[in-house]
Amino acid sequence: MTPTEKRILIKVSNMYYIENMKQSDIAKRLGVKRTTISKYLKRAFERGIVKINIENENYEDLEAAMEKRFGLKEAFIVSKSYDLQAVKQYMARAGLNLLRRIVADNQVIGIAWGTSVRELVRLAEIEKVPRIYADFVPLDGGPENIDSEFHVNTLCYQLARAFESRCHYIYAPAITRTVEIRQAIIQDVNYEKISAFWDRLDIGIVGIGAQVKSSNLVWMGDFGREAIESLSKTGAVGEICSVFFDSKGREVHTDFSDRIIAVGLDTLRNLNYSIGMAASREKVSAILGALRGQIINVLITDEMTAKIILNE
C-alpha cells in the first residue's frame, strides 16, 4: 500500500466514522462515486486502518433471564454507553454475527428501515459475510422525505450485495396520502411480488420505534410530533414497520391504519427469526409491547435497557 493510498483510506475513514459524514457527502467532497467511498471503507477495514473494538463483558445471565422471561429464541445484550450511536454500532455487530450464523441458501430475508438497521448494513458492507443464494426484500414502504441513504430499498440493496444475493425493491411509500392510493398500489404487480415474498419470509430484521420523537414516522417528516404523541389516547406504545401496537403487542387502529404499506405483525410473529433491534430508556415500553405480543422472538439491546425491562 502506497503512502498516497493509505492517506485517502485514513481520510475517508475519519470523515465517515469520526465526523459521521454520509457516504454520499464524502463522495461529493472528494469528487468520486459513492460506491468508491464504500470500497475505500472496506479496504480500510481489511488493511487494519479501521478496527472495531467492543468491550468484552459477559452478559450470559442477563440474556438467559430475558429469554426465560419472554420466551425468546435468543437475546443479545451489548455494552451500555452514553453515546447512543456507539450502542447502535454494538448492536449492529451482534446482529451481523447472528446473520452470519443463520442465513442460508433459498431463504427470504426481510428488512425494515431505521438507524439501527442502517448500522447493521454499514457493518456488513465492510466485513466479510458468507455468500448465499437468497432473496432480500423490504418489509415496508419507503419514506419519501429522507435521504436515500436511509431508504429501505437502499438498505435492502446494500445488505443483499454484501451477501452477494438478490434484492427486490418496493415502489410505494410507507404510508399513502389517501386510502384510494393504497388500494391502487396493492393491486399493482410490484406489490403483489413483494407481498408474495412476505408470505415466504424466513428472517425479519426490524427496529422498534417508541411513540415519541424516536418514531420513524416523526423522523421521516410525514407526521408531526403532536400527531404521534396523540396516539397515547389509543393506547399505542410503539411501532414496527409503521404499524402501532399497545402494551400487549396488539395492533392499534389509527387514523392512518388503512393507508399503511407494510408487512403485518402476525407475519412477523410466525417467522423462524423475527429480530428486533432497539435500545434506550424511552423505548422500554415499546420493546416490552413487542416482547409481550411475541412480535419478535430475538431481541438485540444494551445492558441498561435489558435491566430496566426485567425490572418492569
Image (tube, rainbow, N blue to C red):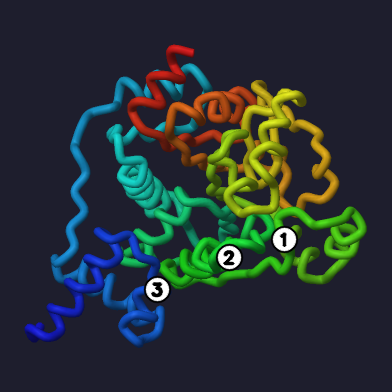
View extreme (right): residue: 180
Q: Which mark is drawn over residue 47?
A: none
Q: Secondary structure at mark 2?
A: strand
Depth order, front residue of 148/225: 225
Q: Secondary structure at mark 3?
A: helix
Q: Residue at x 38, y 54 (%)?
A: 100
Q: Quadrant of the N terminus?
A: bottom left
Depth order, front residue of 102/7: 7
Q: Is residue 199 visible?
A: no
Where is residue 101? Give x, y as percent.
38, 50
Residue denoted by label 3: 25
Compared across the picture, whether 229 is left or right of 112 comes to right
Q: Are marks 2 and 3 in contact (CB under 8 Å)?
A: no
Q: Secondary structure at mark 1?
A: loop
Depth order, front residue of 233/47: 233
- Residue type, numbered disc 2: Asp
Where is residue 140? Give x, y as percent.
67, 55
Image-quadrant location for residue 231: top right
Residue denoted by label 1: 173
- Residue type, numbered disc 3: Asp
